[in-house]
Image (tube, rainbow, N blue to C red):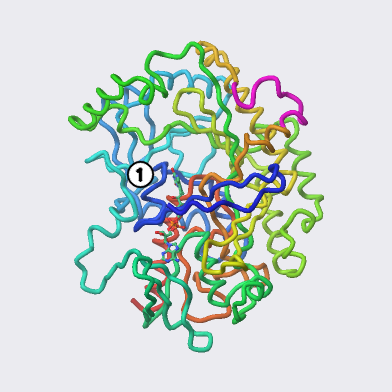
Amino acid sequence: MFEINSAPQVNLQNQSFVAYAGKVLGGGSIVNGMGYDRGTQPDYDAWGELGNDGWNWDNLLTYFKKSSTFTPNKAETLSKYNYTYDLSAYGTGPVQVSLPEWQYPEMPAFWDAMDEMNINKVQEGALGEPGCFWVAASTDPKYQTRSSARSAYYDPITTRSNLKVVTGIQVQEIVFSTLTAKGVKLLDRDTGKTYTAYADMELILAAGAIHTPQILQLSGVGPASVLKAAGVKVKVDLPGVGNNFQDHPAAYLMYNLANDTTINTNSLTNNATFNATSYDEYVANKTGPYTQAHGNGAAFLPLSKIAPDNYKSIVEKLSAQNATAYLPEMYSAYPELVAGYEAQRKIQVEQFSSDAASMYEFSFQGGGFAITALQKPTSRGTVYIDPSNPSGEPIVDYHGLKNPVDVDLLLASIRYTRQIYNTTALSVFEPVELTPGAKYQTDDELKSQIASGLVYPTFAHPASTCAMMPRNLGGVVDSGLQVYGIKKVTIIDASIMPMIPGTHLQATVYAIAEKAADIIKARHGA
Ligand SMILES: Cc1cc2nc3c(=O)[nH]c(=O)nc-3n(C[C@H](O)[C@H](O)[C@H](O)COP(=O)(O)OP(=O)(O)OC[C@H]3O[C@@H](n4cnc5c(N)ncnc54)[C@H](O)[C@@H]3O)c2cc1C
């Protein structure tokens, strides 16, 4: 894994947080938590509203389906856990998606808590509607193992004569003939030797939202001041590269369930017998706790649901802001970056006022680990090459909670999660809040906890650093995913998402990649 220490986060008591990304063939899909889900419909319609023809929920649904296959469980498992799903959300694509053969005994009480909170129970979360639902995993049910970009897309075609994958190689920069990309300079990490690889038709960058902007910046394509500070010759002053950085800030609430069931979410780690029998069961039958990659319950909810009394004031505050006051310093030098943010803010104002777009995530497995994540951050971060070591890791700065609206959204979110743990349904477990702790109640008390460790500015979902938007809105790629100002460079990864969707990102990256394949084939008349 890449584990990059972020710049100190000014609004989080100068703490540094690790930015994680997969450093392996298959990228994040090899190391991720295997949650397979999709954002709400307005999340993707927003991409079209930002000037990207052909990018919206309806169109991406085609590619969500094209990339995935859902396999229902055995009938007895379906009825035992009341699993719900809708096959119309999936197709017959390479990524295998399924629900596990096992759930912790506390789960029914958590679903009862959802009922008690009047949360809409959605049959299938992957159809873009907010509510609570069963979240599937990228698990191949045949073997009960991970289905990844590698196993789904690469392993079946390794013998193709026109495909060669090389690993242990780091792309350093693009090689140009004037402004047309001819290939890339490569570093062999083991030997330290460098090579050049040439591309006949076009070059595709897919290094993820942290390293794709780094490669462009090292190639002289990015904000001029960043390039100059690092001694890189400016080819194209393209300010969007490395700006508009988004992730999901998350609050890690923790409860002690004083009266938990005998087998619970801690049992695999603190009950050696349970762990051993569970492992044997998995090896023998591919059933039991080891078929579960992560908690399969989640509520993705709109702001109006979690903060019915004050969502309008939060929306008014966001609308009234002088945007540049809370944006990274560089935005002041580029009116197009501010214009792009303002276009996004207009959409966020609509989304925060709507019942159809989620702002809050609460994932549950049973147990007292109550992750509460903000799905639509209003702050924007930066990923810039390091002037003192340009070819080392870039400087990742989340600018976490720079916009005070994010703090308002987190306060509302934390309070809503507390309400869930205060339901009669969960009272049987006698939950006691450990983190932040029930003694922190007022806004100021909670804000001090948010700043001092309760909240991380990242959920390992880096996105949006080479946004697909018009150039006059600070975009980096057009709706054909080609980089502005240079020729023959296409980007296909999470960096192109103009606004981060309210979901874990892998399903969306697969859909982008499938759509990109069609775009590129059409471009070359294939
Ligand atoms: C720990 C963790 C847990 C996660 N959990 C979930 C989850 O449960 N569900 C979910 O949906 N999403 C999850 N995600 C997020 C999801 O995996 C990512 O959003 C997704 O993988 C991003 O895809 P990408 O193609 O943009 O980038 P990546 O998957 O990061 O792929 C980029 C690839 O480029 C390579 N690379 C980088 N720089 C260079 C270079 N200079 N030269 C050559 N190669 C390079 C990397 O090694 C990597 O293989 C998680 C991510 C992490 C890190």
Residue 239 drawn at (x, y percent): 65, 70
Is residue 136 shown to the viewer in this render? yes
Is residue 356 shown to the viewer in this render? no
Residue 261 drawn at (x, y percent): 42, 13
Start-end of magenta stretch? 434-446
Q: Which amino acid does label 1 sit on?
A: Ser
- Of residues 253 and 411, which is closer to you in this image? 253
Q: How many marks?
A: 1
Residue farthest to the bottom?
178
- Of residues 137 and 313, which is closer to you in this image? 137
- Of residues 17 and 287, which is closer to you in this image? 17
For label 1, the residue is: 138
For this view, does 424 lie left or right of residue 516?
A: right
- Residue, x 24% and y 30% (percent of image)? 282
Is 443 colored magenta in this rendering?
Answer: yes
Q: How crowded is mark 1: few (under 14 residues within 10 Å), some or many (20 or more)?
A: many
- In the rendered image, which quarter is residue 306 located in? top right
- Residue, x 43% and y 66% (percent of image)? 516
For this view, does 283 lie left or right of residue 324?
A: left
Is 303 colored magenta in this rendering?
Answer: no
Quadrant occupied by the C terminus? bottom left
With respect to residue 24, does 138 lie above or below? above
Q: Quick check: is the Cβ at mark 1 less than 8 Å away from ligand 1?
A: yes
With respect to residue 189, does 43 lie above or below? above
- Residue, x 52% and y 59% (percent of image)? 209
Residue 25 drawn at (x, y percent): 34, 58
Q: Tell me which image quadrant ligand 1 sits in.
A: bottom left
